[in-house]
Amino acid sequence: MSDKTHVTETPDTSHIKNVDVTHEVSDVYIEGIAKFVLALFILMVVSFVLMWALFKVLKSNTAETPPPPMALSERERLPPEPRLQGAPGFAEGLEKSGAAAQGKKPETNAEASQGPPLPKDAMWEIKVVREQWEDVLKNGPVDQNGNRYGMPIDKAKEEVLKQLPVREQKAEGSRQKAESSKQ
Protein backbone atom coordinates (compact mmCIF):
# COMPACT_ATOMS: atom_id res chain seq x y z
CA MET A 1 0.00 0.00 0.00
CA SER A 2 1.62 3.03 -1.20
CA ASP A 3 -1.08 5.40 0.03
CA LYS A 4 -1.02 6.13 3.64
CA THR A 5 -4.69 5.83 4.61
CA HIS A 6 -5.95 5.10 7.99
CA VAL A 7 -7.87 1.89 8.66
CA THR A 8 -11.10 3.70 9.62
CA GLU A 9 -11.30 5.85 6.48
CA THR A 10 -13.72 4.86 3.74
CA PRO A 11 -11.89 3.85 0.59
CA ASP A 12 -12.63 5.53 -2.72
CA THR A 13 -15.07 3.37 -4.66
CA SER A 14 -15.99 5.82 -7.42
CA HIS A 15 -14.30 3.68 -10.07
CA ILE A 16 -16.71 0.76 -9.41
CA LYS A 17 -19.70 0.81 -11.74
CA ASN A 18 -22.81 -1.45 -11.69
CA VAL A 19 -24.96 -0.92 -14.75
CA ASP A 20 -27.87 -3.05 -13.48
CA VAL A 21 -28.47 -0.95 -10.36
CA THR A 22 -29.33 2.63 -11.19
CA HIS A 23 -31.68 3.52 -8.29
CA GLU A 24 -31.97 1.96 -4.83
CA VAL A 25 -35.43 2.03 -3.17
CA SER A 26 -35.49 2.93 0.51
CA ASP A 27 -35.85 0.13 3.06
CA VAL A 28 -38.97 1.71 4.66
CA TYR A 29 -42.03 2.28 2.48
CA ILE A 30 -43.65 5.37 4.12
CA GLU A 31 -46.67 5.56 1.81
CA GLY A 32 -47.70 1.96 2.60
CA ILE A 33 -47.36 2.49 6.35
CA ALA A 34 -49.44 5.69 6.20
CA LYS A 35 -52.19 3.89 4.22
CA PHE A 36 -52.21 1.03 6.75
CA VAL A 37 -52.50 3.39 9.76
CA LEU A 38 -55.30 5.37 8.09
CA ALA A 39 -57.20 2.18 7.19
CA LEU A 40 -56.77 0.86 10.74
CA PHE A 41 -58.12 4.12 12.22
CA ILE A 42 -61.15 4.08 9.91
CA LEU A 43 -61.82 0.43 10.78
CA MET A 44 -61.67 1.24 14.53
CA VAL A 45 -64.11 4.16 14.18
CA VAL A 46 -66.54 2.05 12.14
CA SER A 47 -66.40 -0.80 14.68
CA PHE A 48 -66.98 1.61 17.59
CA VAL A 49 -70.02 3.08 15.84
CA LEU A 50 -71.39 -0.38 15.06
CA MET A 51 -70.93 -1.57 18.66
CA TRP A 52 -72.64 1.59 19.99
CA ALA A 53 -75.58 1.04 17.62
CA LEU A 54 -75.80 -2.64 18.64
CA PHE A 55 -75.79 -1.66 22.32
CA LYS A 56 -78.62 0.84 21.77
CA VAL A 57 -80.71 -1.70 19.85
CA LEU A 58 -80.26 -4.39 22.50
CA LYS A 59 -81.00 -1.95 25.31
CA SER A 60 -84.23 -0.78 23.66
CA ASN A 61 -85.39 -4.39 23.19
CA THR A 62 -84.97 -5.40 26.83
CA ALA A 63 -88.12 -5.38 28.94
CA GLU A 64 -88.35 -5.00 32.70
CA THR A 65 -89.24 -8.40 34.06
CA PRO A 66 -91.69 -8.54 36.95
CA PRO A 67 -90.34 -9.80 40.25
CA PRO A 68 -90.85 -13.49 40.95
CA PRO A 69 -93.86 -14.36 43.12
CA MET A 70 -91.65 -15.63 45.98
CA ALA A 71 -89.64 -12.39 46.18
CA LEU A 72 -89.93 -10.42 49.41
CA SER A 73 -91.78 -7.13 49.37
CA GLU A 74 -90.12 -3.88 50.47
CA ARG A 75 -91.70 -4.12 53.92
CA GLU A 76 -90.58 -7.75 54.37
CA ARG A 77 -86.98 -6.88 53.48
CA LEU A 78 -86.62 -4.45 56.39
CA PRO A 79 -84.34 -5.54 59.22
CA PRO A 80 -85.93 -6.33 62.60
CA GLU A 81 -86.61 -3.55 65.10
CA PRO A 82 -84.91 -1.42 66.38
CA ARG A 83 -83.80 0.12 63.11
CA LEU A 84 -81.36 2.93 62.57
CA GLN A 85 -82.66 6.42 61.93
CA GLY A 86 -83.50 6.98 58.30
CA ALA A 87 -84.45 3.37 57.61
CA PRO A 88 -87.75 2.94 55.71
CA GLY A 89 -90.60 2.01 58.03
CA PHE A 90 -88.95 3.53 61.09
CA ALA A 91 -91.15 6.61 60.88
CA GLU A 92 -94.38 4.73 61.57
CA GLY A 93 -93.25 3.59 65.01
CA LEU A 94 -91.71 6.98 65.69
CA GLU A 95 -94.95 8.83 64.94
CA LYS A 96 -96.97 6.44 67.15
CA SER A 97 -94.58 6.74 70.10
CA GLY A 98 -94.33 10.49 69.61
CA ALA A 99 -98.11 10.86 69.62
CA ALA A 100 -98.42 8.68 72.74
CA ALA A 101 -95.79 10.71 74.58
CA GLN A 102 -97.57 13.96 73.75
CA GLY A 103 -100.93 12.60 74.87
CA LYS A 104 -102.41 12.39 71.37
CA LYS A 105 -103.88 9.23 69.97
CA PRO A 106 -102.02 7.90 66.92
CA GLU A 107 -103.72 8.06 63.55
CA THR A 108 -105.64 4.99 62.45
CA ASN A 109 -105.70 3.72 58.89
CA ALA A 110 -109.14 5.24 58.31
CA GLU A 111 -107.92 8.68 59.40
CA ALA A 112 -104.75 8.37 57.34
CA SER A 113 -106.67 7.35 54.21
CA GLN A 114 -108.94 10.44 54.33
CA GLY A 115 -106.35 12.65 52.68
CA PRO A 116 -102.90 12.47 51.21
CA PRO A 117 -100.10 12.49 53.77
CA LEU A 118 -98.40 15.80 54.30
CA PRO A 119 -94.92 16.04 52.80
CA LYS A 120 -92.14 15.94 55.37
CA ASP A 121 -88.76 17.55 55.16
CA ALA A 122 -85.62 15.44 55.11
CA MET A 123 -84.77 15.96 58.80
CA TRP A 124 -88.22 15.38 60.33
CA GLU A 125 -87.27 12.07 62.01
CA ILE A 126 -84.30 13.67 63.74
CA LYS A 127 -86.46 16.60 64.87
CA VAL A 128 -89.10 14.27 66.35
CA VAL A 129 -86.48 12.20 68.17
CA ARG A 130 -84.84 15.34 69.59
CA GLU A 131 -88.22 16.65 70.76
CA GLN A 132 -88.89 13.34 72.53
CA TRP A 133 -85.46 13.37 74.18
CA GLU A 134 -85.84 16.97 75.32
CA ASP A 135 -89.27 16.14 76.76
CA VAL A 136 -87.80 13.22 78.71
CA LEU A 137 -84.95 15.38 80.01
CA LYS A 138 -87.29 18.20 81.09
CA ASN A 139 -90.26 16.25 82.46
CA GLY A 140 -88.97 12.73 83.09
CA PRO A 141 -89.55 9.47 81.22
CA VAL A 142 -92.98 8.07 80.32
CA ASP A 143 -94.02 4.46 80.92
CA GLN A 144 -96.20 2.31 78.62
CA ASN A 145 -99.42 3.70 80.17
CA GLY A 146 -98.38 7.29 79.50
CA ASN A 147 -97.64 8.07 83.19
CA ARG A 148 -94.47 9.95 84.06
CA TYR A 149 -92.08 8.44 86.56
CA GLY A 150 -88.75 9.57 87.94
CA MET A 151 -87.75 13.21 87.76
CA PRO A 152 -86.04 15.46 85.25
CA ILE A 153 -82.25 15.61 85.32
CA ASP A 154 -82.08 19.26 86.44
CA LYS A 155 -84.38 18.56 89.37
CA ALA A 156 -82.39 15.44 90.30
CA LYS A 157 -79.16 17.47 90.31
CA GLU A 158 -80.70 20.05 92.66
CA GLU A 159 -81.87 17.30 95.03
CA VAL A 160 -78.40 15.75 95.15
CA LEU A 161 -76.79 19.14 95.81
CA LYS A 162 -79.19 19.76 98.72
CA GLN A 163 -78.16 16.46 100.33
CA LEU A 164 -74.40 17.14 100.15
CA PRO A 165 -72.86 18.68 103.31
CA VAL A 166 -71.36 22.13 102.90
CA ARG A 167 -68.01 22.91 104.58
CA GLU A 168 -66.99 26.31 105.83
CA GLN A 169 -64.06 27.93 104.14
CA LYS A 170 -61.21 29.06 106.35
CA ALA A 171 -58.65 31.63 105.24
CA GLU A 172 -55.50 29.68 106.08
CA GLY A 173 -53.34 30.56 103.10
CA SER A 174 -50.11 32.60 103.60
CA ARG A 175 -51.26 35.25 101.16
CA GLN A 176 -54.56 35.68 103.00
CA LYS A 177 -52.72 35.95 106.38
CA ALA A 178 -50.45 38.68 105.00
CA GLU A 179 -53.45 40.62 103.72
CA SER A 180 -55.30 40.31 107.01
CA SER A 181 -52.21 41.49 109.00
CA LYS A 182 -51.84 44.63 106.81
CA GLN A 183 -55.32 45.76 107.76
Image (cartoon, rainbow, N blue to C red):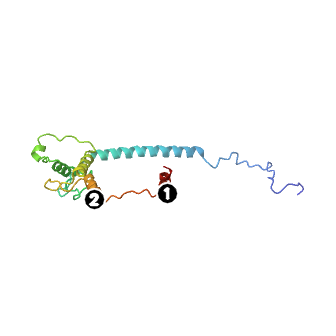
Q: Which residue is located at x 13 percent, y 39 percent?
A: 115
As drawn, the residue found furthest toward the right would be: 2
Q: Which residue is located at x 44 percent, y 43 percent?
A: 45
Q: Earlier in the sequence, mark 1 or mark 2?
A: 2
Which residue is label 2 attached to?
Answer: 163
User: Residue 107: image x %, image y %?
Assistant: 13, 46
Indicate left or right for 81 with 48 as reference. Answer: left
The part of the image, by quadrant, that contains residue 144 is: bottom left
Q: Secondary structure at mark 1?
A: helix
Q: Out of 80 and 10, give the one closest to the viewer.
A: 80
User: Residue 19: image x %, image y %?
Assistant: 73, 47
Indicate left or right for 48 with 125 as reference. Answer: right
| Numbered circle sitting on residue 126 | none
Q: Secondary structure at mark 2?
A: helix
The part of the image, by quadrant, that contains residue 60 is: top left
Q: Residues within 10 Å of mark 2 (few under 14, many from 20)?
A: few
Amino acid type at mark 2: Gln
Q: Is residue 84 visible?
A: no
Amino acid type at mark 1: Ser
Q: Are marks 1 and 2 in contact (CB under 8 Å)?
A: no
Q: Which residue is located at x 49 percent, y 53 percent?
A: 181
